[in-house]
């Protein structure tokens, strides 16, 4: 597991994979889901696949667009 | 058909939007240049028609940009332009009354090459979630439908270049069955290494290295066509609906016909083109004598050009050397599924402006038809015939009329 | 005057058997033709199962030059077209009135990938070496090649084109072909669809969005439309070809008429490239318009051939669409998905399903939905589990749903000998 992924890193990764501009603050906002940010199911699958490939995240992790980037960050062991 | 063109959106090497495209086409500007999208370029095709200065973000939601290929960027941007040009808000059209038909040839190859490289270099888990929706031929129709809330009848035709004309007949059929408006067109972005690799096998691309002489159909120097990227989307409406909302009919889509004379047997295409032209004119309720201008396919192969010239000669008979014919695509390249669609856009503009645009670069035409060269020719254009041949053997003709 | 369209020829290449006879035997037996992928080494892929055709192009009658020139999906179509054309016994009076309209979603993917691997040295080079490409690669780039090959076999000189609306292409191609006849652009159109998508890139792209079943240890039970325990579709391959003919044209020559193509419509959901809304409003609209063209009401439809891909969102979406159109009658009409037996062959499946519908009409048998052990509680219609059912059928509906948001519907009706 990559312990170094910061909210800003995750935000940049989400932006790159989905085309949605996301900030580090939005990533740590518990009330904001992927869907709220404009990330759909395909976009979220792209984010998860990228984390699994290059950041050591377990392949068993699954998330839905109604969950939040903050939950994802917590799963990654980052500073939420 | 009771279909009228009310809006144009064009993305071509000659210009983005009709305000750039028409002056360039009218003045015979040559927009061909070195194939710069592949750098370095190891391939035996040096000259191409590339769209420069296109910024997808100016037209498309960045979320959509990352999940689509360049051919879909072109189509989405052209659709947005066409709707704006038609001053038509899709929300004002009855639900299920607005559809989309696009023509395609190669799909999203550049996107596909990136993903297939990841697969073979790194493994299956490296293929991203957008490959399934970016590469396939239906990407443009689907994204245009979703992006603009169009829930009407939609379609995707693949008949190479000729499919660009067939799309108008398909849309016309939907309008006659009750649709109120259709976005019709197609776009192509065939300049990534693998797409070029595929096209080279055609044996039809010009190896010429000089942009001013690479693509010279109808001359003794004709030695293949120069490929181009880009395309167009047009808003085509039911005549009654367009009138009811006070929209200007720019041209009437009056008739279409398609024939087939064998894959890469362009030597046999004369009769196919002739019958397609006659069929389209018959559907439009006009004769060959009524045709004021012809937009040619211009394959730039010796046999193919001779067959097209023969079709024109047989269609017009005595009058063959007096009907202005033209191939503006020598100025920006043959854009595959976008090629005939761009011809339709140019034909609508020719009707509006009363001018037959020239065939840039071509001077010494070897056939005894009236090929417009040099500068545009002023003319009162009531009826235009557009001809197109597909690489796999289709011959299509579309008749457009002054409203 | 309305020109009516009838089916006078049929040919099939499908998993579990080539030719119409073997195809129908499989469907009515309720057996499944899904198995571990053998067409490539699928080690490392999430989904490693498929419904493959046991197809040898030479045994199927193609010559060496044809085998060399044609990609696998074109070979399927050529063989299916030969069967359909032979059975139709059309004596072509005017080839300029004979058209071809074929469907495919991903076209020449198999050859495109094979030659990509060769020209890129297995992904090492972005600047592929075109000198290593097959001489037929250019035909793989555009699925117009599919329609062209079929046109050359039957001598067509009329409109020839391919329809490529993703997973509804098989229905849309037949619908488009019927329009060509209705609009008086042709008298006879050879139509259908073909697909051979069982290649690494196509399997990987469905892996990436988890659309396909990962029940790799039990392939025979992996395709489970409308079942609570489904986990996605099983990719398939194959082709079906139908000869469509204008009613009077068929009547004059005393042709055997299998069915009438009585209605067709397609609508888009304008919602998402892959996602479906829980409601089936747009599919319902397509079905209504197709039934309207066929002049049929809800009580006239005797069988619904479902899209039934075996994804949760699809099964609920189309069940809702059927309830919207048919109301209480939806609970009386048998609904089944042959994808449970022969998988989902993307752009081809719509035509293969129409072939099944023609056979259902002429034989008076509804094919079953295999593997439907425990229905999804949200899917409460009669999905004909496991066993085929004899039933007098006069009109059948086939629907399809695909990436891009396309929803299509075709209505076929029974006709006697003309």
Image (tube, coloured by chain):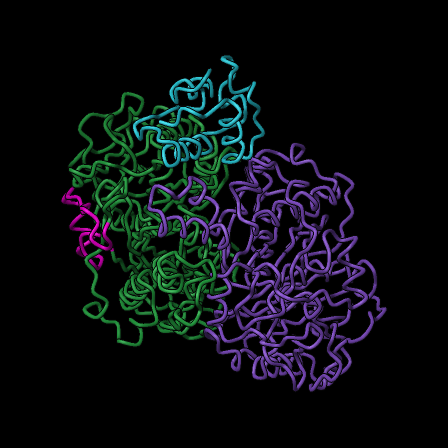
Chain colours: A cyan, B purple, C green
* Above/below status of C82 relative to C402: below
* Above/below status of C338 relative to C87: above
| Left or right position of A55 against B392 | left
Instruction: Please tell me which residue is depicted at 52% across the width and 58% down the height of the picture.
Output: B192
- Residue closest to the far front: A4
- Residue closest to the far top: A31
Q: What residue span does the magenta drawing correspond to?
A: C14-41
- The quarter of the picture where the C terminus of chain C appears is bottom left
Q: Position of residue B311 (x, y in %)?
A: 62, 79
Count of numbered circles on the image = 0
Asked if the magenta segment contains residue C31, the reply would be yes
| Left or right position of B74 against C112 | right
* Residue C390 appears in the figure: yes
Asked if the magenta segment contains residue C155, the reply would be no
Q: Quadrant of residue C89?
A: bottom left
Instruction: Please tell me which residue is depicted at 72% across the width and 72% down the height of the picture.
Output: B326
* Above/below status of B75 relative to B39: above
Q: Position of residue C79 (x, y in %)?
A: 28, 65
Q: Position of residue B45 (x, y in %)?
A: 57, 71
Observer-nearest of B92 and C361: B92
* Above/below status of C379 relative to B14: above
Instruction: Please tell me which residue is depicted at 29% across the width and 50% down the height of the picture.
Output: C358
* Residue C255 appears in the figure: no
| Left or right position of C58 against B108 | left
Q: Position of residue C285 (x, y in %)?
A: 48, 35
């Amino acid at each position: 597991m990559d312990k170094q992924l910061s909210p800003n890193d995750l935000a940049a990764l989400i932006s790159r994979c989905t085309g949605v501009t996301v900030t580090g603050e939005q990533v740590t906002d518990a009330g904001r889901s992927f869907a709220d940010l404009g990330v759909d199911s395909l976009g979220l699958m792209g984010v998860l696949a990228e984390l699994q490939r290059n950041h050591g995240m377990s392949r068993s992790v699954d998330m839905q667009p109604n969950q939040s980037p903050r939950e994802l960050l917590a799963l990654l062991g980052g500073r939420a | 058909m009771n279909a009228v063109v009310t809006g144009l959106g064009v993305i071509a090497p000659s210009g983005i939007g009709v305000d750039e495209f028409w002056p360039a086409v009218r003045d015979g500007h040559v927009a061909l240049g070195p194939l710069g999208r592949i750098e370095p370029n190891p391939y035996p095709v040096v000259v191409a028609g590339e769209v420069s200065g296109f910024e997808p973000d100016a037209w498309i939601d960045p979320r959509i940009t990352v999940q689509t290929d360049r051919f879909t960027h072109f189509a989405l941007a052209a659709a947005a332009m066409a709707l704006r040009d038609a001053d038509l808000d899709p929300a004002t059209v009855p639900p299920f009354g607005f559809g989309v038909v696009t023509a395609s040839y190669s799909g999203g190859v550049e996107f596909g090459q990136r993903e297939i490289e990841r697969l073979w270099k790194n493994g299956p888990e490296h293929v991203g979630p957008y490959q399934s929706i970016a590469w396939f031929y239906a990407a443009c129709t689907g994204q245009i439908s979703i992006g603009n809330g169009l829930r009407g009848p939609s379609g995707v035709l693949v008949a190479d270049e000729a499919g660009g004309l067939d799309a108008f007949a398909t849309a016309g059929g939907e309008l006659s069955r009750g649709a109120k408006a259709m976005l019709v067109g197609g776009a192509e972005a065939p300049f990534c290494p693998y797409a070029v690799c595929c096209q080279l096998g055609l044996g039809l691309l010009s190896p010429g290295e000089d942009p001013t002489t690479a693509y010279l159909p109808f001359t003794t120097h004709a030695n293949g066509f120069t490929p181009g990227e880009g395309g167009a989307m047009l808003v085509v409406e039911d005549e009654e609906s367009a009138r009811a909302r006070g929209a200007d009919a720019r041209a009437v889509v009056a008739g279409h016909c398609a024939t087939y004379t064998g894959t890469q047997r362009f030597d046999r295409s004369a009769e196919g083109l002739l019958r397609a032209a006659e069929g389209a004119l018959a559907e439009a309720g006009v004769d060959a004598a009524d045709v004021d201008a012809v937009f040619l396919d211009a394959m730039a192969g010796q046999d193919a050009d001779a067959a097209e010239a023969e079709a024109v000669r047989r269609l017009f008979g005595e009058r063959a050397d007096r009907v202005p014919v033209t191939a503006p695509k020598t100025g920006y390249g043959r854009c595959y599924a976008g090629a005939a669609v761009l011809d339709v856009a140019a034909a609508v503009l020719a009707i509006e402006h009363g001018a037959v645009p020239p065939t840039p670069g071509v001077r010494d035409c070897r056939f005894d038809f009236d090929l417009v060269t040099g500068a545009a020719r002023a003319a009162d254009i009531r009826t235009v015939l557009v001809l197109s041949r597909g690489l796999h053997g289709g011959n299509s003709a579309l008749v457009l009329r002054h409203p | 005057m309305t020109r009516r369209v009838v089916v006078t020829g049929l040919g099939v290449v499908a998993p579990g058997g080539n030719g119409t006879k073997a195809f129908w035997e499989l469907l009515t037996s309720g057996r499944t033709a899904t198995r571990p992928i053998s067409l490539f080494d699928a080690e490392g892929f999430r989904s490693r199962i498929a419904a493959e055709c046991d197809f040898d192009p030479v045994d199927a009658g193609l010559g060496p030059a044809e085998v060399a020139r044609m990609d696998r999906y074109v070979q399927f179509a050529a063989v299916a077209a030969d069967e359909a054309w032979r059975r139709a016994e059309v004596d072509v009076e005017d080839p300029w009135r004979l058209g071809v309209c074929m469907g495919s979603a991903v076209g020449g993917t198999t050859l495109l990938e094979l030659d990509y691997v060769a020209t890129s040295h297995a992904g090492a080079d972005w600047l592929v070496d075109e000198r290593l490409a097959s001489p037929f690669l250019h035909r793989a780039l555009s699925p117009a090649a599919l329609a062209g090959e079929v046109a050359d076999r039957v001598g067509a000189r009329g409109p020839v084109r391919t329809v490529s609306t993703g997973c509804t292409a098989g229905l849309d191609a037949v619908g488009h072909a019927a329009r060509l006849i209705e609009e008086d652009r042709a008298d006879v159109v050879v139509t259908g669809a073909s697909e051979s998508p069982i290649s690494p890139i196509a399997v990987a792209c469905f892996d990436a969005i988890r659309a396909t079943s990962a029940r790799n240890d039990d392939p025979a039970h992996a395709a489970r439309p409308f079942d609570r325990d489904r986990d996605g579709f099983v990719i398939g391959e194959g082709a079906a070809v139908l000869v469509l003919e204008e009613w009077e044209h068929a009547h004059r020559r005393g042709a055997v008429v299998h069915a009438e193509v009585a209605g067709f419509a397609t609508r888009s959901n304008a919602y998402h490239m892959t996602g479906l809304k829980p409601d089936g409003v747009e599919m319902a609209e397509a079905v209504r318009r197709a039934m309207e063209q066929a002049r049929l009401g809800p009580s006239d439809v005797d069988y619904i051939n479902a899209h039934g891909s075996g994804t949760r969102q699809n099964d609920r979406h189309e069940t809702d669409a059927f309830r919207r159109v048919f109301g209480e009658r939806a609970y009386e009409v048998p609904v089944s998905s042959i994808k449970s037996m022969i998988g989902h062959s993307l752009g081809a499946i719509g035509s293969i399903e129409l072939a099944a519908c023609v056979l259902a009409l002429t034989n008076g048998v509804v094919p079953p939905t295999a593997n439907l052990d425990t229905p999804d509680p949200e899917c409460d219609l009669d999905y004909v589990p496991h066993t085929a059912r004899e039933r007098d059928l006069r009109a059948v509906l086939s629907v399809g749903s695909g990436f891009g948001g396309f929803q299509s519907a075709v209505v076929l009706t029974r006709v006697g000998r003309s």
